[in-house]
Image: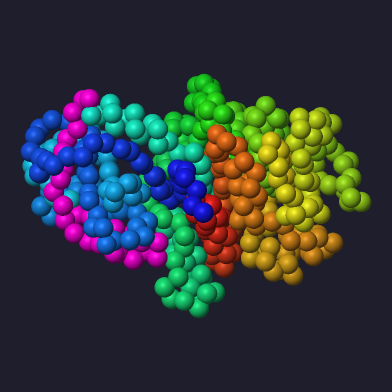
Amino acid sequence: MARKKFLLVVTIIMSLFLLVGCSDDNDDDNLSTNDKGILQVQVSIPNEAEDIARVEVDVKDGTKLISANDTEVIEDNKAIVALDDMTINTDYTVEVRAINNDEYVIFHGEQDNVKLLTKDEINDFNINLKKAEAKYVFYMIGDGMGANQRELGESLLQVIEGDSTARLTMNTGEFTTRSADLPITDSAAGTALATGSKTNNGMIAELPNGTELKTLVEAAKEEGMATGIMTTTRINHATPAVFAAHNDSRHNYNDIAVDYLDSGVDFFAGGGYRYFIPQGTTYLGRNLDSEREDGWNLIDTFEDEGYITFLSEEESEDFIDYLPAAGDKVFATFTNYGLPYDINRQNLSLASEYREELLNIQTPSIAEITQKAIELLSQDEDGFFMMVEGGRIDHVAHGNDIAGTAYDTIAFDKAVEKAYEFY
C-alpha cells in the first residue's frame, strides 16, 4: 500500500529537491508584464496518461530555456511548479513531459496557461507549500564524487549487470563547492551543506570568526524529527561532524566525538571507534586501537544515555540482525578507521588493510546502514532527517584506485536506492 507522505532526497554533489504546492485553477493565456513574483505553471495532463511518476516542465522564451523544473503529480492530473522572483517581460511557452515509473515519457506537449501570482495568491501558495513540507529527508553526500566518478561507477554497473542501459539511481546536478577562504574546498567546508553558510577550510559548523552555526540536524531536532548520521569513513570525520558538532578544526577528532554526546542524534553509524574508547580497551578478546588519552570511554557514556551500541567489526552481524523498536537510539562504530573500501568489503581476501584475524568479517555496506536507519527513524511520527555519506569515494580516489572508486560509487548509489525504495 502506498504511503501518503512527502519525501525530500538531496544528493551532493548531486541534488534533487521535491517541491509540492497547491493553488486555484486559472485560465489565463501567456502573460506579458514587467512585474516580479512567483511564476505559477499549472499543467493539465490527459486522463489517458496513467501511472505518472513526475512531470517535467520547461519554461521557454522562444527557443531560449528560462527554467526547468520537475514536480510530483497532484490531484486531477494537474501539477504546479513555482519559479521564484522571475521577471515576466514576454510571452512564455510551457513544454510538459509526463514520466511514468519506468522512466518512459507517456505525454509530451506544449501548454500556455501561465500566470504571475498576486500578493494574496503568493501568500496562499506559501501556506499550501508549508503544509506540504517534506516529512522524510535524505541528505546524501558523495564525498569527492563528481561527474567522472559517477560515469565510472555507471560503466562498471553496466558490466556487472550485463546491461548497457543500466543507470545509477542518483539524479545529478552540479553547483560550486568552494569554501570561504579558498577556491578549492575540503570536507570541513561541507559546513555550507549543513548550515547554508560558507566557512574557511577546516572549520566545523562555525564561521571564520568562531560564531557557531545552526545545522540542519539541529533544525530538524527543533521540529521534533528523528535524526541520523551515517558514513563509510570515521563517524567523526569532517563531513558528518559539520552536522552535529562545532569546532575550529576538523582535526580535533576527540573533541568532536564528545560533541556527539550532546547532539541528540538518534542514529550514528560508521567507523572510527578509536576516538571513542580509552587506551587499553579490550573487547571480545581483542585489543582495540585508541587515540584518546583522557581515559574516557564514550561508548559507556552513550550506553548510559540510552543508546544501543555496536563496537568493532565483530558486532557487524549483530547490527544486521538488530530489529529497531520505536524510541531506540543507536551508536555503531565498526572499525578503528573508516569502513573498508567496498571492493575489499565484498572480496574479503583482498582486504589487506585489515588484520588477518578480521579477514572473514564483512562489515555492513552503506546501503545496509541506511536501511537500518530507515527502519528505526521512520517509526517517529514527526518524520526524520538523515545524512548519508559515501565518505570513502574521496579516499579511494586519492589513491588513484579506479576499480575501488567505481565500487564505492556504486555502493553509495545503492544507499540512494534505499531512499527511493522507502518512498
Which one is in front, 82 or 24? 24
Q: Which of the 4 image quadrants contains residue 34?
A: top left
Which SS type dominates the magenta stretch? strand
User: Residue 280: where, in percent of width, then height?
Assistant: 88, 41
Q: Answer whether residue 96 is magenta in the image.
A: yes
Give the side of residue 65 with respect to residue 407, left or right: left
Q: Is residue 208 visible?
A: no
69 up-or-down from 154: above or below? above
Q: Which of the 4 image quadrants contains residue 224?
A: top right
Q: How many marks?
A: 0
User: Residue 115: where, in percent of width, then height?
Assistant: 16, 38
Residue at figure coordinates x 47%, y 63% from the top left: 168
User: Residue 408: where, in percent of width, then height?
Assistant: 57, 60
Give the side of residue 231 with respect to residue 128, left or right: right
Q: Is residue 370 visible?
A: yes
User: Residue 121: where, in percent of width, then height?
Assistant: 23, 29
Give the side of residue 365 with respect to residue 419, left or right: right
Q: Which residues are magenta?
A: 95-120
Which one is in front, 39 or 201? 39
379 up-or-down from 160: above or below? above
Give the side of residue 258 with respect to residue 81, left or right: right
Q: Answer whether residue 323 is magenta in the image.
A: no
Residue at figure coordinates x 75%, y 54% from the top left: 321
36 up-or-down from 233: above or below? above
Residue at figure coordinates x 57%, y 68% from the top left: 403
Residue at figure coordinates x 67%, y 32% from the top left: 260
User: Residue lying furthest right in this view?
Assistant: 285
Which one is in front, 100 or 192? 100
